[in-house]
Image (cartoon, grey):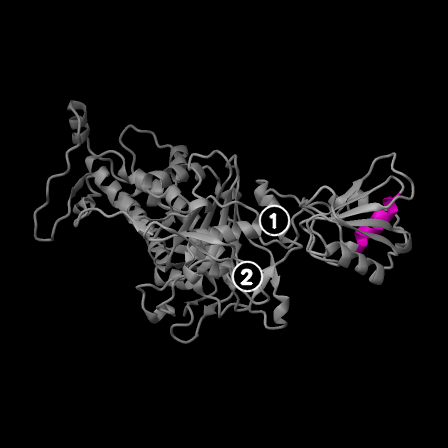
Amino acid sequence: MDRHDGSDIDPADQWVLDPETGDYRLRLDSDTPPAPTVPRQGGRRARREERRPVPEQGRRRAGAPASRKAKRSMKRKVLMWTAGTLGFVLLAGSTGAWLLYRHLDGNIATVDVGTAGSKEVTSKDAVNILVIGTDSRKGLGVKYGDAGSVGHADTTILFHVAKDRSNATAMSIPRDMVTGIPDCPTKQKDGSTKTIPATPQGSFGPRFNESLGQEGRDPGCTMRTVTKITGIPVDHFVLVNFEAVKTLSTAVGGVPVCLTHPIKDTTPEGEGSHLDLPSGPNKVQGEQALAFVRTRHSLKNGSDLDRIDLQKQFLGSMIRQMKSGDTLTDPTKLFKLANAATKSLTVDTGIGGVAKLTDLAKDLSRVDPEHITFTTLPVKDNPAEGTKHATVVVDEARAPALFKAIKSDVSLTKTKKKPATADSKLRGAKADPSQVRVLIHNGGGPQGAARTTLEWLQNTKGVTHATNGGNAPKGKQDRTTLTYGPDQADQARALAAMMGLPATALHPGAADAEPGADMTLTLGGDYRGAGTPLADPDRLPDDIPQSRADKEECVG
């Protein structure tokens, strides 16, 4: 990590904003008389501007009409995940601005993640930002648990913004999800690159949170892991620590939250959050805010998935709080927020610095909170653990549809589910299994999938006219397909019902296909084994959790 260093005494620390005058002045000890304000540069016009009184915050100047539209426009310019734009609103218009700019710019730490991301900020494409909350206890003592923790990916959210900026999806990734971690080239302090070997997925590990910190992995490793799981390229990362939650929640004057049940965490010192809140509406900040987003032992199932629900509520509420309060129009509050946020950030070099963060912030602020949806990557209990349920795995039947929706810029707030009735290709009579004729190719499924599927169909389903066609002639494909002739629709419906194929997998063949020919089943990259239903890529599962940033909901 690289943090910009200035001289022994940062010039920005010598200047403070006087909220009564709107000017910058030298920082003074309590027994020192006030220093003169910083003169603005320029000619007579600038001197006239210097003499012009600064209007009091929250009041309009005499003769200036109040504009609710203008106020709303100002409040929409808040940065959702970083404080870049806040810094620039504060900094505009004086010599002291350069000093404060330098101060805020020097707050931000960066990591070179190489080819893992760092896309140009000016991109007009969709943007994917990985927000990582690390559980590092460095410098915080034992009250938060393991004081020597290197910091893992404790809370991770993939924030996707559509190309036209009409909507955004924030997908939480459970930290206890068992997944493989790919090879990870990491930059060393001496400028060299060290590749940390991949860790393949086993029955019990590694867990997703080990993609950061473990064996020296940097945030680029977490970015690569997310792309491997979802197929979604990650452009940037923003890393925050425990202190970020405390300082930001305090800077905005507290974050409103609502609980369906009271929470009282009584776990031993150093192990739990020790949160104690009654049911109903509450406002949390500082230590209490940190406890809120960390707590899980006292929740319904005591799991990370329950905690994710609290975190989603907290983030949505913070967005609303920043937009609805006076933070953006109060210079003192604005500086506190910008200073706290930038001190808490570590980002990739592609957005390292206030200027780059501001460009990104202005771009992302075009998304209305009404169309920011929070969801969670679909998972299921790890079958290797039996009834223990300490870890989870990706739900291969439900997750692909969500990944596709995100990659396709589909707004989850606008998604309308298909009617409960099946697609027309699945409606109608079904042939007897003994009449089903099918040639099976492996076009991207697990190794040996064509053989094992053949055996499953013959031995358990009675499909005696099934043939192993080996590898697909046209190579690998993402989706499983079933191609059939005009006289084989009943066979296709029967096979689809046996295997759990969605209607989108069925492809009627040419009208001149020979009667009595075999259908062709090509197992694609989405195939997970015989008997495992395939998700419809054009339909989100009914139980995908969703919540909106503009709506207050009680959780717990």
> Could you tell me the amino acid type at mark 2?
Met
Residue 417: image location, x then y, percent: 67, 46
Labels 2 and 1 touching (C-beta < 8 A) = no
Q: Where, by quadrant of the figure, is residue 37 drawn?
A: top left
Reading the image, the residue beneath label 1 is 402
The answer to whether 102 appears left or right of 153 in the picture is left
Residue 504 forms part of the magenta stretch: no
Residue 171 seen by the camera: no
Does residue 154 show up? yes
Task: Please provide the residue range marked out in magenta.
Answer: 488-498
| x and y, in percent, of residue 181 in the image | 52, 57
Left of 73 or right of it: where is 337? left
Q: Looking at the image, which is closer to me, 144 or 166?
A: 144
Q: Is residue 496 magenta?
A: yes
Read off the residue under disc 2.
177
Which residue sits at x=15%, y=47%? Answer: 27
